[in-house]
Amino acid sequence: MIILGIETSCDETSAAIIEAKPKSKYINLLSNVTSSSLLLHAKTGGIIPEIAARKQVEYIIPVIEKALSDANTDFNNVDNIAVTVGPGLIGSLLVGVETAKTLGYFLNKPIVPVNHLIGHIYSNFIDQPSVDRRLKAVDFPAIALIVSGGHTDLVLMKNHNDLKLLGGTRDDAAGEAFDKIGRLLGMSYPAGPTIEKRAQNGNPKRFNFPRPMIDSGDFEFSFSGLKTAALREVRTMKQFASPTGGLNNETICDFSASLQQAIIDVLIKKTLKAAQKYNAKSILLGGGVAANSKLREDLKSSIVNLKSSIKLFVPTKSLCTDNGGMIASAAFFNHKPISWKKITANPELYFD
Ligand code: KG4
Ligand code: ZN
C-alpha cells in the first residue's frame, strides 16, 4: 500500500510518500518534503496565522509534486491520501484538507483523516535503518509523550486504534514554555532549539526553577508558573546587569540549562510514573520538543537506572517536528478511509 500524507496544521507545508505491506510493524518512508514559513515568523515571537496560510497555498502543490518525484512515483500508484484534519490553525488546516479533497475527487481515491497529535506518535513507526531490527517493533501497552508547541500530552496506547489520554497541560505546553521564556531572553521564534544550544554550555543548577506539578499524583502538566518564575528572574537580573540591561553569555547559558532541566525533570518523572502504573512495554516520544537531545538522553538513562526492560522509541530529529510522513504512518496503522465528501477540518480536535 502506498499513502500520500499531507500536513499543514501550523507553519509547515509537508507531503510524504510511504509504503507498507498489510501486516508491517513499521513503514518505509519513500519521500518527505517540508517547506516552512518559519523565517517569516522568527522576529514576531510566534506564528502569524494569515502569513502561514498564504505561504501554504503557494507551497502545497510544488511540495506534493516533489514528494511524488522524490519517491519515483505518481498519483496513479497512490492508494490513499492521508491529511491532518486537526488540531491546528484553521486557515492552515484548510489548505491541506481542501487540497486532499480535490485530489480525492479528481483521482477517485479515498481519504484518511488524521489527528495531528496521533501523527506525532506515529513518527515512531517509521523505519529507521540505523535501529537494530529486533528492537524496531513497538510492544504494547505503550505510553506516548507528545511534546510540541501546542501540546504536552501523556497517552496510553493499548494497541493501534486504542488510545486513551491520561493527562495534558492545563495551560502552556512544554514547547510554548521554551518559546515564551526564550523570548524574554531576546531569542527569536522558535526558541526551543536555541535554548538547547545555549544550555550545552550552561550550569543547570544555577537557577532553582520550580518543577510544576511534578508530584501531583496525576498526569496533568502546567508550565505557566515556570514562565512567571522565569520572568521574575529575568527582571531581577536586568536590574543588576550592564547599563544597557543586556545579560552576559554565561548567564544566558546557565539560565537556559536550568530552565531546560526543570521542564525535562517534570516530563520524565510523569512519563515514567505512567509507564509503571500501566505496565508499559514501550515509551514513545513525539513532537517538536522530542528533538531536544537532553530530553532524549535523560529519558534513556532514567529507564536504564530503573533497570527496566521498557523499550524507548524516539524518532530521528527531522521526524519530531511536523511532517507528512508521520501523517501517512498514522493513516496506515489506523486505516479508516472515507469519501472526500466527509472530510472536514477541526481546529479543536483532541483525543476522543
Ligand atoms: O511539533 P512541532 O513542530 O509543532 C507543533 O505541533 O507545535 O513543535 C514545535 C515546538 C516549538 O515550541 C519549538 O520551540 C519546540 O517544538 N522545539 C524544541 C526543540 N526543537 C523544537 N524544544 C526544545 N528543544 C529542541 N531542540
Ligand atoms: Zn506538531
Image (cartoon, helix red, strand yellow):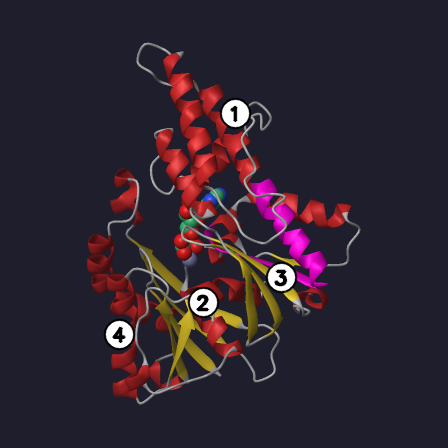
Task: State which mark lies toward you, 4 or 3.
Answer: 3
Task: State which mark lies toward you, 2 or 3.
Answer: 3
Q: How many marks?
A: 4
Q: Are marks 2 and 4 in contact (CB under 8 Å)?
A: no
In the rendered structure, which segment of residues is drawn in magenta? 264-288
Q: Looking at numbered disc 2 in the image, what kind of residue is underneath it?
A: Gly
- Residue 160's image quarter? bottom right
* Mark closest to the chain's N terminus, 2 or 3: 3
Label 4 and label 3: CA atoms lie apart by 33 Å
Considering the numbered disc 2 on the image, is that residue within a helix, a strand or a loop?
helix
Label 2 and label 3: CA atoms lie apart by 21 Å
Q: Nearer the viewer, residue 220 or 271?
A: 220
Residue located 44% across and 69% down the image: 327
Q: Position of residue 63 (x, y in %)?
A: 31, 65
Considering the numbered disc 3 on the image, is that residue within a helix, a strand or a loop?
strand
The residue wearing badge 4 is 99
User: Measured along the vertical axis of the image, is residue 182 above or below residue 219?
Assistant: above
Q: Position of residue 96 (x, y in %)?
A: 29, 69
* Mark closest to the chain's N terminus, 4 or 3: 4
User: Could you say which disc has been placed on residue 254 in the image?
Assistant: 1
Majority secondary structure of the magenta segment? helix
Q: Looking at numbered disc 3 in the image, what kind of residue is underneath it?
A: Ile
Q: Looking at numbered disc 4 in the image, what kind of residue is underneath it?
A: Thr
Q: Position of residue 144 (x, y in %)?
A: 58, 60
* Mark closest to the chain's N terminus, 3 or 1: 3
User: Measured along the vertical axis of the image, is residue 20 above or below residue 266?
Assistant: below
Considering the numbered disc 4 on the image, is that residue within a helix, a strand or a loop?
helix
Q: Nearer the viewer, residue 277 or 125?
A: 277
* Mark closest to the chain's N terminus, 2 or 4: 4
Considering the numbered disc 1 on the image, is that residue within a helix, a strand or a loop?
helix
The residue wearing badge 3 is 143
Neighbourhood count class around disc 4 (C-alpha, 10 Å): few under 14, some 14–19, many 20 upward? some
